[in-house]
Amino acid sequence: MVFSSPTFLFYFFPLFFVLYFVSGRSNAVIFLLSLLFYAWGGLTHVPLLLFYIIVNYAAGLAVGAAPHKRWILALGVALNLSLLLLFKYLGFLEDQAQTLAAWLGGGPLPQFRLALPLGISFFTFQGISYLVDISRGDVRPQRSLLKFAMYKTMFPQLIAGPIVRYRQIAGKIDGRRVSLFRLRHGAMLFALGLGQKCLLANTVAFPADAIFRLPDGQLTAGTAWLGTACYMVQIFFDFAGYSNMAIGMGHMMGFSFPANFNRPYCAQSVTEFWRRWHMSLSTWFRDYLYLPLGGNRGGVWRTYRNLILVFLLCGLWHGANWTFAVWGLYQGCFLIIERLGVARVLAGLWRPLRHLYLLLVVAAGWVIFRADSLSQAGHFFAVMSGWGEGSPGLAPVARYLTPSVVTALAAAAVITAMPQWSERRLRADLRRVLATIPRARAAVDGTVAIAFGAGSLALVAAAAFSLATNTYNPFIYFRF
C-alpha cells in the first residue's frame, strides 16, 4: 500500500485517524494498524518484522543492562546486518559466484533467491541506531514491548523513511499532544507531499522509465537528456513527496520526524548537496559510520578513505547492483575532489556556474543510479555526448515531451528554485510589509490561513483526479 493510492487515501488514512483519536492516541492502535499497513504488501514478511522487533527489544535491554560489554552491542548490530545481507544481497553474491564459476569452467551453482521485504533497509538502520544510542548513553532502553513495537512499526516511516531514530521520538511515546495548529500543519504537509508525488513525480515517471528501457538503436542525444531530466525530477519529488507525507502524518499523530530534504538541487557543490539530500540517511552514515571511523581526524588520507568507504556503503545500501556501488564511489570521489581544491575554485565562480556544475554532476550520477547495468550507463553517456546515437525516427523526443511533461518539468524547475515559504514565515513577512496599516495583522493572518488551506485542498483534489485518470503510479524507494 502506497500513500498515493486510493486504498490508502480513502480507506486506511481516515480509518486510522478516527480510531487513533477515538482511542485517545493509543500506542496499541498505531502498532496494530501499522502491522495491517505492512501486511497489505504481503503477509510473508510480517513474521520477519516481528522478529526484528523482538530481537532489538531484547538486545536493547541487554545493552542497557551492561553498556560496557561491547560484545553484546556487536552481537545485536551483527544480527541486524546479517538479516539485511541475507535478504538484500544474497542474490547479488550468488550472481557474482555464478559468474566466477562459469569463468573458471565450473557448472551452475544452486540458487537461494529470497524476496526482498519492504523497508528492510530502513528498519535495519533504525535497530542499529537504537542499540548504539543506548550504548552511548544517549537514550535509555524502552522497557515496554508494545511501545517499542509501536516505534518500529509506525507506518508513516516504516517502509521508506525518513529514518527516525528512537531518541528523536522517545519523549513523545508517553505524553504527546496534538494541537489544532499541529494537526492543520501536518495535513498541509501531507497535501504538499501528495501533490509532489502525483502531479510531478508520476507525470515524468513514464517518459523516464520508457526512455531508460529504449534499445540502443533507438536512443538519441535528445531522448537521453530528456530521460535524465525526467528522472532527476522523478526521484526527487517521488521521495521528497513521500517524506513530506510521512512527516505530515507524524505531526498529525503528535510526533516530530526529522526533515529529509532541503532544496538539494539548489546546492552549489556536491558537498552541499549531501547536506541537503536524504538528510536522515546522510546523517545516519555520518554519526554511526564516518565519525566512528575517525571522520576527518587522523590525517588527509584517512579522511579520504573514510569518505570512499562511507559512500560505497551508501551506494550499496540503495541496492545490490554494481551500478549502486559505482554511484556511491562516484559521489565519494567528487567529495574528495572538492576537498583537494575544487571547492576553492567553485567559491570564486559566478553562482549560476556553480549551480550548473552541481546539476551536471548530479545528473551524471543519476544516470548511473537509474541504469540497469554499467554497460547501459556507459551507452547512455556516450549518446548524451553525441556518440553512437540511434535513429531519431524510431523514438522521437516529441513522443515523450508531451504538454503535461513540459508543464511538470517547468513546475519542478520553479519549485526547486523557490525559497521555502512556510505559513508562519509568509505571515511574518506580510506583517512586516504591512506594519503601518491598521488592523493589518488580523487581515494577514486570516488571508494567509485561507490561502494555505485552499491551496492544500486544491492539491489534494488535483492529486485525486490524477490518480483517477492515471494508472502509472510507481514508487522508487519501495525497492530500497
Image: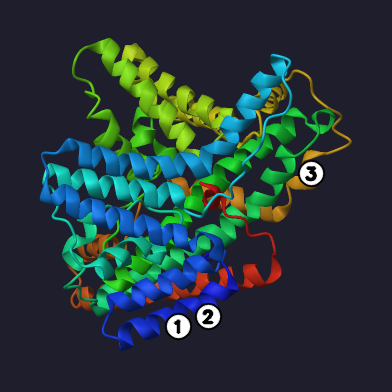
The kind of residue on which mark 3 rests is: Ala
Q: Viewed as shown, does residue 109 lie left or right of 11?
A: right
Horizontal side, residue 370 vs residue 118: left or right? right
For the point 57% across and 61% down, the residue is 198
Q: Badge 2 is on which residue?
A: 11
Where is residue 160, by image quadrant? Answer: bottom left
Q: Is residue 205 above or below residue 180?
A: above
Q: Nearer the viewer, residue 170 or 338?
A: 170
Toward the right, the furthest residue is 393
Q: Are marks 3 and 1 in contact (CB under 8 Å)?
A: no
> Is the residue under label 1 in contact with that under label 2 (CB below 8 Å)?
yes
Residue 15 marker: 1
The residue identified by callout 3 is 398
Crowding at dot 2, Cα within 10 Å, few <14 / some 14-19 / many 20+, comes out as few
Taking depth in this image into account, of 223 and 468 the one nearest to the observer is 468
Disc 1 residue type? Leu
